[in-house]
Image: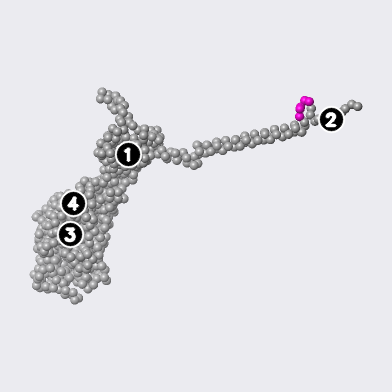
Amino acid sequence: MASSSRPTGRTASSGASPREGVGIAKRAAKGARRLRLGLAVMLAFLVVLGGRLVLVQGFDVGGLAEAALSKRLQTTVLPAQRGQIVDSRGTVLATSVIRYNITVDQRLASAPDFTEIERRVDNPDGGWKIVKVSRDQALRELADALGKPVADVSAAITGDKPFNYVARNVTPDTEDRVMAVGFPGILSEGVTQRVYPNGAVGGNVVGFLGSDGSALAGIEQTQDGELTGKDGSRVYEIGADGLRIPVATDKLTEAEDGKTVRLTLNSDLQYFAQQAIQTQTNKYSAEWGIAIVMDAKTGNILAMADSNSIDPNDPGKTAAKDRGARAVSAAYEPGSVQKTLTLAALIEEGKANPLSRYTIPPTYTIDGETFADAFTHGTEQRTLAGILGYSMNTGTVMAGKELSPQQRYDWFSRFGIGQPLDVGLPGEAQGILHTPEEWDTRQQYTVLFGQGVTQSTLQTVRAYQAIANNGSMVQPRLIDAYVDKDGHTESPQAAAPTQVVSRETAQQVKDMLESDVTEGEVKPAAIDGYRVGAKTGTSEAPREDGVPGYSGVTSSLVGMAPMEDPRFVVAVVIQRPKGDIFGIGNADVFRSVMSQALRLYNVPPSTGTPARLPQYAQ
């Protein structure tokens, strides 16, 4: 029987069964899918990376390019020049000079690989060569240029600070020598320093700056906005070595300098007035003194002098209480200089004239209040001019009672008493002029002769200016103009003139003031060749220790010249002088300051006949 064979599922040609073939095909398909997936993932990654590069390099959404640039940018401030303060003729009272701060990037100056400097040096016979200077030699040159010990300079430049000061406020010449050394990391920054070429001349008016450049007093403070300019800048790129990249960013913004403030002061007259009032203050061991010269036509303040004047170059040497301008900041009872205003009001109201007659007893009582004079006298027949000429409180009250309390208040207000000055100085005192409702029985009369009312010296001068200027009161002026870098000028707006009293009244009052000098008690104020009118004043000075009462007196004199057409008003005040009150007088100071003003401005000698109004009624 023949044997039979069974199929094995393999063929001779393939060597594999059909089932195995199917498995191989499945594995091949799976591998292909994995490959395609990997390629897709890689392609997606490349797409994302490419997109990111496009965003960063093309659009810089995150600002990375700008951030990198900002790290390379260096900004140097170009300081604006602070405007000058000058007098009416252009004499510089305050100016600024360029100074430099020397700074260092210690990381560059202390770099381990910095051992020498290469310099280009010109040959005597032409051409140039490169020489090498050791770090130690360069350090010695740097110290020599700064005028400092080598050890101090070495300590300033050694370390890892990106910024440190080596020296401050050096001159331009010193800065040139420092930068010529070529020491790595050494830079300079320009700053301005305020200087006052005329020292204490006008110092209390000009003011001063603090060590940080802040305006602290005087015109420097009130006009800071006009004087201060706008800083400029220069922006450029630096490399990692700290050196400037020549062809990179270089943006320049020019500085805008401040304006010049031109004052009405005459520095020569200011100096003379300061010397005169200081001498007077010393003579009587007074607490302080003031002297003012005003142009009666324009209101220009030609001199405003304080004793113990401050030198703005070194304000710390002057006591704080003496650093301001007392002519505007110190308010006090004016005393008898106020009688001029009272009598002007009486004349303007038609209640009296310079020759009106009054019978004046040794003392005068009204409403239970008794008034006396500074000198002893019996019953006298006086003219209104004689009441002023001998400064009689009794006669002033007797005549002034014809004015109602409201009229007294209104007339003082019209003369600027209790009204602001606004001349451009800090701390201006407005003074105190109470309303009639606030006056007690005595004060309603004492205000007539300058007690129970306070005002600054400049307020008194303003009132006398109105009399001198035919009754027209003008705004006192201390700031004449602002001048920009191109020479364009702009004057501050002034209030319109006010006709306080009529021309006729003003003339009658001027005649009485002139008679004070020719016939009355102010004869020492006379000036050879010129007609002069003046009035003295004395008042009690309040105590300053908080205790009620008085301590010493305030002595003043206000006058004008030449009387045929007054050009100047001069006031002299001293506070708490020592000595006999009847022996203290300011006529000599008034006379010297007024004479100097007349000479400086070439005012011709007087013409016409001086007023000589009778002091006694016939």
Q: Badge 2: how crowded within 10 Å, few (<14), some, or many (20+)?
A: few
Q: Are marks 4 and 1 in contact (CB under 8 Å)?
A: no
**Residue for badge 2:** 6
Q: What colouring method underlies this structural image? A: one colour
* Alpha carbons under labels 2 and 4: distance apart: 142 Å
Judged from the image, the secondary structure of the residue bearing numbered disc 3 is loop
Q: Which of labels 2 and 4 is toward the front?
A: 2
Q: Amino acid at mark 4?
A: Gln
Task: Tell me what residue is drawn at x 28 percent, y 39 percent.
Answer: 151
Tell me which numbered mark, 2 or 1, is placed earlier along the sequence.
Answer: 2
Among all residues in the image, which is located at the extreme bottom?
368
**Residue for badge 3:** 287
Among all residues in the image, which is located at the extreme right?
1
Q: Amino acid at mark 2?
A: Arg
**Residue for badge 1:** 157
Q: Quadrant of residue 444?
A: bottom left
Q: Are marks 2 and 3 in contact (CB under 8 Å)?
A: no
Q: Badge 1: how crowded within 10 Å, few (<14), some, or many (20+)?
A: many
Q: Are marks 2 and 4 in contact (CB under 8 Å)?
A: no
Tell me which numbered mark, 3 or 4, is placed earlier along the sequence.
Answer: 4
Where the N terminus falls, by quadrant?
A: top right
> Is 419 inside the magenta-drawn segment?
no
Magenta-tinted stretch: 12-16
Q: Quadrant of residue 343?
A: bottom left
Tell me which numbered mark, 2 or 3, is placed earlier along the sequence.
Answer: 2
As drawn, is 106 to the left or to the right of 579?
Answer: right
* Alpha carbons under labels 1 and 3: distance apart: 52 Å
